[in-house]
Image (spheres, rainbow, N blue to C red):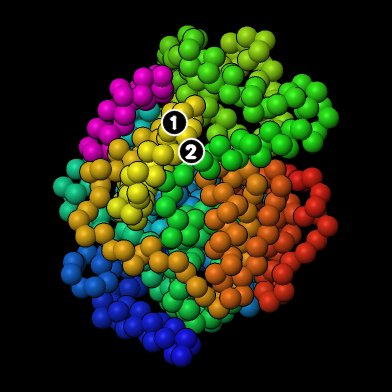
Amino acid sequence: MRLAILLATALLMVATLARADTTSLAPVDCWFAIPQAHGARCYHFTVPASRDGERDGSFTLPVAVLSRAGGSAHADPVVYLTGGPGSSVGLTIDEMPGWWSYFDKVPWLAGRDLVLMDQRGSGLSRPSLDCPEVERAGLRLLKLSGDRAARRGVYVAAADACRERLVASGLDLDDFGTEATAEDFLALVGALGIESWSIYSVSYGTRVALALMRHGPPGLRAAVLDSVYPPDERAYENRRASFDAALDALSRACALRESCRADFPDLRVAIDEAVARYARSPKAVSIVYDGETANVAFTGAALLEHLFYLVIEADAVTEIAVVLHRLKAGEQEAMKEMLTTLASYYGDANHFGEGKYFAVDCQEEVPFADAARLEADIAAHPLLDNYGIVAEDWFACAGWVRPEADATIKAAVTSGIPAVVLQGTFDAITPVEIGRRTASRLARGFYLEFAEVGHKVVDQSVCGQRMAAAFFDRPDVKPSDPCLAAPPERPTW
């Protein structure tokens, strides 16, 4: 019965694609350099803006299939689903060298082709949902880190200006959701003539992967869900609790390292004291940004935001201990470095489509969030209330939410497709509880946890890369290796 339902769903999906068949895959010359002993096929993939036939128009998505000279040993290429929503998959000329290095080094790509496509609204896709309005406000937002009300006003105004421009250009923001993105990848696999394929997905990309798995598409052999962000998650209700749990895990890890424990008997207390100190008494710092000198206050909020990125992206125990030591010594240079890094996050022209982020997350999260639980999360974590611009997304989303949000998109995914969930104990965005819960609902799902690793395990753990490779080789067997119990080995690129 279940198989019949899955088959019927897949056939309905294919029929929907056929009714609005403006899909075409056009080979093009690759726009990036291809190293020796490697190969690449490049395409422009045209897809209908709306597959329900309600709206005309189409989107063009860039595609690159990376390979090695002499062909691949495995028949199942890996389709990579990136995060965000809004992140570029990395197909720009300046990003592609990183992919070639990655392609050669990570074990889960050994013997397999890699399929890359920017999601609709992101990266090099056309149209783009980039928001230069938000980027231009970046330095001003950073300067206002200690004045939350003023910062919120600037951020909301910039997001609203972007939305108004996109809508005035004729775009319907309903066309950029997770289901539409999943259908694009399903159509791409068909257009490329791929019979057997696997998925590596990270962060929001795991939500796209789960949408595909829900439909049980033909040929999908296995899926890696790295730092899983499932559709049933109510992210706004526990953002501060997730960060709080990651900081507690960080403190416990410090207590297990003699050198860290000697300097910080309770690392969490040291972090809280430092944040509170600069919240009470911000320090004036001059930074050079975009060729000009700018005066920016180093606040508790700025410090907390910097620590947030270290927890999810770096060797946090080591890096945060260094930061605290430098601040204790009163180093202005340390404050300058942190603020300069944050300024680049806020204001640089980037490969992130803020409009895609708002169009997806605002519509698929905000209408389903319990405002009382959000307020309880804030009340329970007062020190973490102002932990960066992401804390203002709830307010920026107000203008992006459309009427009649579809509650079916929040249903938990069950699937019989082999999958492994990789989750880091320092993940302040998608905590371990989410990974465990998601894996438990997958009939052939496995769960692996990586100590002292943050968000996006594949970039922070050699062990994680090995486990993904082992899973792709034998997707019906839970990967196991002594490295799971060892201190994390960080990849070098």
Position of residue 84 in the picture relative to residue 34 (left or right): left
Position of residue 211 in the picture relative to residue 180 (left or right): right
Q: Determine the residue positioned at 83% across, 30% down.
A: 258
Say which of 61 and 173 sits in front: 173
Q: Amino acid at mark 2?
A: Arg
Q: Determine the residue positioned at 60% across, 40% down.
A: 246
Task: Name above or below for residue 153 compared with residue 165.
Answer: above
Position of residue 168 in the picture relative to residue 362 (left or right): left
Q: Amino acid at mark 1?
A: Asp
Q: Position of residue 322 (x, y in %)?
A: 69, 23
What is the total number of numbered labels drawn onto the structure image?
2
Q: Let me know if residue 151 is in the magenta part.
A: yes
Q: Secondary structure at mark 2?
A: helix
Q: Residues within 10 Å of mark 1 (few under 14, many from 20)?
A: some
Q: Position of residue 155 (x, y in %)?
A: 31, 31
Quadrant of the rendered image containing residue 386: top left
CA gap between label 1 and label 2 equals 7 Å
Task: Name above or below for residue 372 compared with residue 270.
Answer: below
Magenta stretch mostly in which secondary structure?
helix
- The residue that label 2 is drawn on is 240
Task: Name above or below for residue 146 compared with residue 114.
Answer: above
Say which of 468 and 8 sits in front: 8
Q: Let me know if residue 156 is in the magenta part.
A: yes
Which quadrant of the rendered structure holds the C terminus? Answer: top right
Q: Is residue 257 visible?
A: yes
Q: Which residues are magenta?
A: 140-161
Q: Secondary structure at mark 1?
A: loop
Q: Position of residue 222 (x, y in %)?
A: 60, 73
Quadrant of the rendered image containing residue 463: bottom right
Q: Determine the residue positioned at 59% across, 40% down.
A: 245
Say which of 79 and 470 sits in front: 470
Q: Mark number for residue 385?
A: 1
